[in-house]
Every structure is written in structure tokens, then in C-alpha cells.
Amino acid sequence: MPMIGLLITLYLVSWGLNYIFIPDFQNYETAAIRILQPNKFWMILSIFSITIFNILLIIQINSKYSIIRAKSFLPVFFFALFISVWKETHFLYLSHLALSVFLICLMLFLGMYRNRKAVEPAFIGSFLMSLTGLINPVYLFLIPVSWIGFMILKCFSIKVFFASVIGLIVPWIYYFSYNLYTGNEMHLFENLFFEFKPYFIFSGRALHEQIYIIVIISLLITGLAGIYTNLLNDSIQTRKNINLILVYLVFLILLVISFAKHALSLLPFIAFCLAMLLSHPFTLNKSKLYPLLFIIFCLVNIAYMFFNYYTL
């Protein structure tokens, strides 16, 4: 209950601060990756609602596939905390919607474990994930990662692969056909190649942001050590699920480094992967180190939120 109270307090305070202290949201740096420009209040309210929906999906994923073999509130706590503290995510409503689609697809893929005939979920999942490419083409890179996931989940076969490829292609057949028929120019992919500009993740960031990134990376490394130290206590399917989420996280970080312009649109996805991976050791590891790390984690996020608004 104290954790729930802390979460709700931080959650509402952070969203309120976004509404109060960022009035000129039209000129905010994330405006370039938004399609619509609605009223600020309704935009933030819509993102808040989508975030609640994503939290429900995370609960469903964890309960159905037992990524954490005990009842835990931490996946929700960590995800909501990241979304609340990372002020940039409060303006990326299309990215939150894309995350909703990704979580639905992930549930379909996780359900394919050891089923080499799972053609239907492979098609539907790839189809839905391909649709997110209409929001941002960089999301399409997650589909090849999903093929690697099919191998990890031992459900990869020629039928499953071709079903996924067809699911990837179908939305774009309609997209290009419609634009060719109407004579519209198609600019969706023309700049993606030129936007490939690898950069150092700390370059151009404020000192408090650099410290925050270092702390989160350190906690992640410690968490991964805790996961893989006790991984044999989990079922084989749970191990595969954890490995898949880790693969997604590594690839998302590579995308952030490679496509700096689209880094912000990937933050909700990274928040999900971090929340799931950090929750496992913090819930199941009985070492006295993790309660201390949890307190440090909360304090660092609160401090980061404060400096975000103080330096705005």
C-alpha cells in the first residue's frame, strides 16, 4: 500500500507539472514527431488514458506468461514511474499508442512458444506491428527482432516466417496503392536513410541527465546479474520470455543511438523493457542489496524529475 500511494502521488504530481510548467508545448522539441496538434489538456489526458491501458496490458502479460513467478506490483510501479518522470513522454501520444500495439503483439508472440504452426498469431502480430510504421517507420525495425524472438521461443518455421512477412507487407500494399491512385507524394521513407546518424548517448545532455543515465544503466546491469544468477529457478518458458525482452531492449538502445531524431519516440518501449527486467530481481532476489537499490532508484527518479523542471 505505501508503494501504491507513492506511485499515485508521483504519477499525478509529474503529470500536473507537465501541464503547468510547459505551457508552450507547440514549440516543444517533441512537436516534430507528432502528427496532430490538439489542445494541451486533452493531449495530456489522452496520453494519461493510454498509459493506464498500457499498464493493464503489462499486468496481463506478467500474469499470463509468469515473467515474474510471484505476484508483484513492481512492473506497474517501474513503468508508471518512468513514464511519469520522463517529461518528454508526456507529449508522445502516438508513441504510447504504438506501444499499446506492440504489447498486444508481444502477447501474441509469447503465446507462440514451441508452436511451429502458429501462423495466425505470427500474421496478426506482424500486421499490427507493421501498422505502427505509419506512425514512425523506425518501428518497422522491431519486426526483424521479432523473427529473432521466434527462434528464441522455438516457434520459428518457414510457415511462421512467411506468415509474418505477409503480415508485414499487407498494410503497405494498401498504403502505396492508395497513394499511387490518389497521386499523393509518399515521403514516409525518403528521409529514414539520411536520418541514420549514430551518436554518443551522452553528447549534448545536461549533467543531471548524464548522471541519471549512468545510474539507470548501473541498476540494469546489477538487475541482469540478479536475473541470470537465479534464472535456473524459473521455468524454461520464463527464461525464453526474459531473453526476448532483453533482446528487444538491446535493439531499442541501438536504435536510439543510430537514429537520434527518433530517440524520443522509442522511450515508452524502453520504459516497458526496463520495467519488466528490473522487476524480476527486485521481486525475487532475497539479497539485502535490492531494498537499498530500490530506495536509491526511487530517490534518483524523484531528483531527476525535480531537475527536469528546475532546468526547463
Image (cartoon, helix red, strand yellow):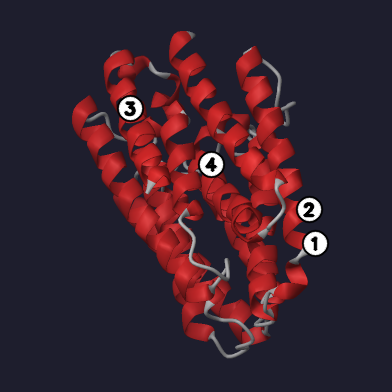
Which quarter of the picture shows residue 158? Answer: bottom right
Disc 4: which residue: 266
Q: What's under tag 2, amino acid-wise? A: Ala
Q: In this view, does 157 lie above or below 291?
A: below
Q: At 30% from the left edge and 50% from the top edge, which residue is drawn? A: 182
Disc 2: which residue: 225
Closer to viewer: mark 4 or mark 1: 1
- N-terminal-most mark, 4 or 2: 2
Q: Confirm or deny contact between disc 3 and disc 1 (CB under 8 A).
A: no
Label 3 crowd bin: few (<14), some (14–19), many (20+), radius 10 Å: some
- Which SS class for mark 3? helix
Q: What's under tag 1, amino acid-wise? A: Thr
What label sits on residue 103 in the rendered view? none
The CA distance from mark 4 to mark 2 is 25 Å
Instruction: Please provide percent x and percent y for residue 62.
Output: 49, 66
216 horizontally vs 225: left or right: left
Disc 1: which residue: 229
Closer to viewer: mark 4 or mark 3: 3
- N-terminal-most mark, 3 or 2: 3
State whether residue 197 appears in this view.
no
Quadrant of the drawing holding the C terminus: top left
Disc 3: which residue: 13
Label 1 crowd bin: few (<14), some (14–19), many (20+), radius 10 Å: few
Q: What's under tag 3, amino acid-wise? A: Val
Q: At 72% from the left edge and 53% from the top edge, which residue is drawn? A: 287
- Which SS class for mark 4? helix
Q: Which of 290 and 172 is in front in this view?
A: 290
The CA distance from mark 3 to mark 2 is 33 Å
